[in-house]
Each structure stands twice: as structure tokens, then as C-alpha cells.
Amino acid sequence: MLNMLDDCSRLFVGSKIYPRETILAYMDFLSAAFLEYGRPLVLYVDWHSIFYTQNPDALTELGQALKFYGVSFRYAPTPQAKGKIEREHQYWQGRLPALFAAEHIRQIAAANAVIHDLRQHRNKYEVHRELGLAAQTAWDQALAEGRSVLRPVIPDAWWPYVWSHKQKVRVGDDGRIQIGNSRIRLEVPPRTSVVLCQHPDGSQSVLAQMPDPARKPIILFTNRPK
């Protein structure tokens, strides 16, 4: 389960179960949270390999996606430093197993629908012990008083491709590349290097180049839903 918490208001800006903790899970999770609440300046994270590389001058794929939209990582120096979010993990661990058992919820989609409603209820109505306010009230006050650096998200042409798992592949001598069980022809010369994008929903796209804010995407193939 992935969770994201606003440090100021304690608002849950995202809570969702995924089959596995993968790069695509994070791409899906963060892009949805940013669309709903806006882009933060910084995400406070641990030293997981999805967030951190052994080369301090390099970014992970997720770090590159965040940088494209002006978001960076700050790394927790110790496990204890992430105590706020760990306490919120316990919030879910103390509620969800018994609830799912009582309601006979066994599918991830059904579980996430329940989690969405619980997250909204918790944000709006449960008073935080330290703040003395519900998280949504604290969030709204911060916005009203200008104590927010969140930036609204207006998805640009790159948005669905930045939030995908990308790898460079070379077009074969037959002018095709392998996508799933099919060989797909592309309108580029053989042996051209292209970018294969795996989207969180399972669809694929092929781009002429990696995302670049100074250029528009050239889409050579996509089976993304319209």
C-alpha cells in the first residue's frame, strides 16, 4: 500500500493498494495525487532504490519524472525521521484487515474504493490530536492564508509519457519492434533508437525521443485508450 501525507496539515493526499511496489505503481500514484491536489516542491522519502541511486549525481527514473515537473526528493536521515507517515501506515493497518474480512473484500479494486472513502472521511472529519483540527480544515486554512507552495497541474502533451516506465529500444531491420506478443511496424528507418513507454494501465506507446520540455512529443505508436 502506498500513502502520501501533507506534512503541514496531515492531509492524506493519496492512499492506494497495488499488487506490488513497482516504478509503475509510483508513477500512477503520484500523478493521480498531483492532479487532485497540485505539485509540491519536495517529497520526503526513504532510501528505497526507486528513490535513490548509489551515484548522488544521478536520478532514478522516478526522480527524473518528478524533476520534469519541478519536484525533488528529500531523504529521511533515519527511519525514525519518517515517523509521521509510519504512524499513518499504522492507521490503515489497524483498520483495513478487519474491515475487509467483515465486508468480504478480496479484490484490489474493491479495496481501493473503500480506502478512497475512508481517506476522504478521515481528512474531513477526524480531528488530529496535535493540530486540534481535521486535516482538511488545516489544509484549507493554509491555502487561505497563503502558506502553500503547491502548484496546480495542467497536464501538457508530455504528461502521460513522463508518468510511464521508459526504455530505449532499437528498431529491427524489418522496421518493427516487439510490443507484447506483436511485432509493430514504425515509420522510422531500421535500427533507429526509439523510446518504449509502459503506462500504468498496461498500454504502451513509442516515442521518437525521451521527454524534453523544449520539444513536443513525437508519437510513433500508442494503444492508450482515447
Image: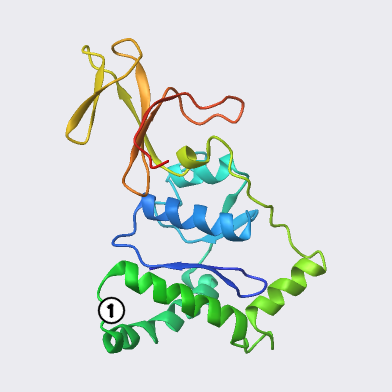
User: In this rendering, is residue 25 above or below 15?
Assistant: above
Q: Amino acid at mark 1?
A: Ile
User: In this rendering, is residue 6 above or below 68?
Assistant: below
Query: Is 193 situated left or right of 149 in this image?
Result: left
Q: Is residue 73 visible?
A: yes
The residue tagged 1 is 105
User: In this rendering, is residue 167 above or below 25?
Assistant: above
Q: Is residue 86 visible?
A: no
Q: Choose between 19 and 59: the one closer to the eye.
A: 19
Q: Position of residue 112 (x, y in %)?
A: 38, 70
Q: Choose between 55 and 173: the one closer to the eye.
A: 173
Q: Quadrant of residue 169?
A: top left
Which residue is found at the position 25% from the left and 75% from the top?
106
Q: Position of residue 68 (x, y in %)?
A: 57, 39
Q: Quadrant of the C terminus?
A: top left
Q: Choose between 58 and 23: the one closer to the eye.
A: 23
Which residue is found at the position 41% from the left and 42% from the top?
164
Q: Position of residue 42 (x, y in %)?
A: 61, 55
- Residue farthest toward the front in the current orientation of the protein: 226
